[in-house]
């Protein structure tokens, strides 16, 4: 097969290429083209600049059955007026996902906010919470607290705490659980930060009325960004109160541990943290 070059009305044979060579050349050209497109699209990433200001949104209605504590089924049909029914407004951007949850049939229930931060693949969200504690024994207690009271008690028993120490731990756990229950109740009643929660509600209403598409520059996208910003501020307020209660709980247990007991706990957490170092 030939490549011909036009020359003053005639054709001159330039290169004699066989079919496999032409295919290889075409593949090489395509690879170079794709590499160029990738470089242009990801130029910001290569130089450490933000790569996306995209915003996504969708809405989810979750009904509740006549018996709200059991799944909906022919024997447990949906109850449209159930106070357990929810409407979730789901937003997402480069920082992660934001859920603003409303309870349309329960006027006493305030909006709820849930966040899912963008994390590196393979790195659980709890890693940063544990790493924020400098003392290895404190890291072990923080990890155990995040996993649940059963792991906390198991690790403390394996560290050979005495019966009297474990009795104090039980009281500390009860006090912590009471503090968490009160915080959850405050969230449900909208008492954590009523002013900020009211601003989220107004921003959400403005978003739902805004014209345009959330993925394109304009009023609707601007309104979505405002909802997410306010929701993240509110979540930070809640998290600060939760972190304060957790720190107090962990500190009370740490105060009654001997150096040997602390070392035993540190030995528990060390191999776990090495996996995410």
Image: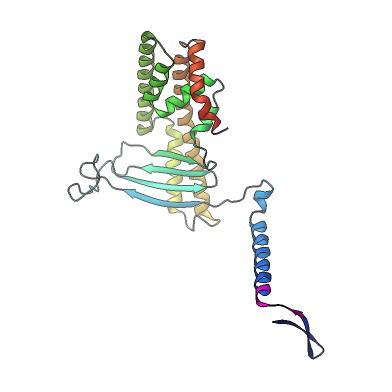
Closer-to-camera residue (197/258): 258
* Residue 213: % across, % down: 49, 58
Closer-to-camera residue (210/192): 192
Q: Is residue 181 above or below residue 14?
A: above
The region drawn magenta spans 15-21
Describe residue 215's horizontal placement relative to residue 24 as left or right.
Answer: left
The image's colour scheme reads rainbow
Residue at image location 44% in from the left, 31% down from the top? 193
Residue found at the very far bottom of the displayed protein: 9
Residue 16 belongs to the span the image colors magenta: yes
* Residue 9: % across, % down: 79, 91
Closer-to-camera residue (155/211): 155
Quadrant of the drawing holding the N terminus:
bottom right
Q: Is residue 166 above or below residue 1?
A: above
Image quadrant assignment for residue 120: top right
* Residue 199: % across, % down: 46, 39
Quadrant of the drawing holding the C terminus:
top right
Q: Is residue 40 above or below residue 115?
A: below
* Residue 41: % across, % down: 64, 57
Closer-to-camera residue (257/88): 257
Residue at image location 82% in from the left, 89% down from the top? 8
Q: How many marks?
A: 0
Residue found at the very far right of the displayed protein: 8
Residue at image location 33% in from the left, 49% down from the top? 61
């Amino acid at each position: 097969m030939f490549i011909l070059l036009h020359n003053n009305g005639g054709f001159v044979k330039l290169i004699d290429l066989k079919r496999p060579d032409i295919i290889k050349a075409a593949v090489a050209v395509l690879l170079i083209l794709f590499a160029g497109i990738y470089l242009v699209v990801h130029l910001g990433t290569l130089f450490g600049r933000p790569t996306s200001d995209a915003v996504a949104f969708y809405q989810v209605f979750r009904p509740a059955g006549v018996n709200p504590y059991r799944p909906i089924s022919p024997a447990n049909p949906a109850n449209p007026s159930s106070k357990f029914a929810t409407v979730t407004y789901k937003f997402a951007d480069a920082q992660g996902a934001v859920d603003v949850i409303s309870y349309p049939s329960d006027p006493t229930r305030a909006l709820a906010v849930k966040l899912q931060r963008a994390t590196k693949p393979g790195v659980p969200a709890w890693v940063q919470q544990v790493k924020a504690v400098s003392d290895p024994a404190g890291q072990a207690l923080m990890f155990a607290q995040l996993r649940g009271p059963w792991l906390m008690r198991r690790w403390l028993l394996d560290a050979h705490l005495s019966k009297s120490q474990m009795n104090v731990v039980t009281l500390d756990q009860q006090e912590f659980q009471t503090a968490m229950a009160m915080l959850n109740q405050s969230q449900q009643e909208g008492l954590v930060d009523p002013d900020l929660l009211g601003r989220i509600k107004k921003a959400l209403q403005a978003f739902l009325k805004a014209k345009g598409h959330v993925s394109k520059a304009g009023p609707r996208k601007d309104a979505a960004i405002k909802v997410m910003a306010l929701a993240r501020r509110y979540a930070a307020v809640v998290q600060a109160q939760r972190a304060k209660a957790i720190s107090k709980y962990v500190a009370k247990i740490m105060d009654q541990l001997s150096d040997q007991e602390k070392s035993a706990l540190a030995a528990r957490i060390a191999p776990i943290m090495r996996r995410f170092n």
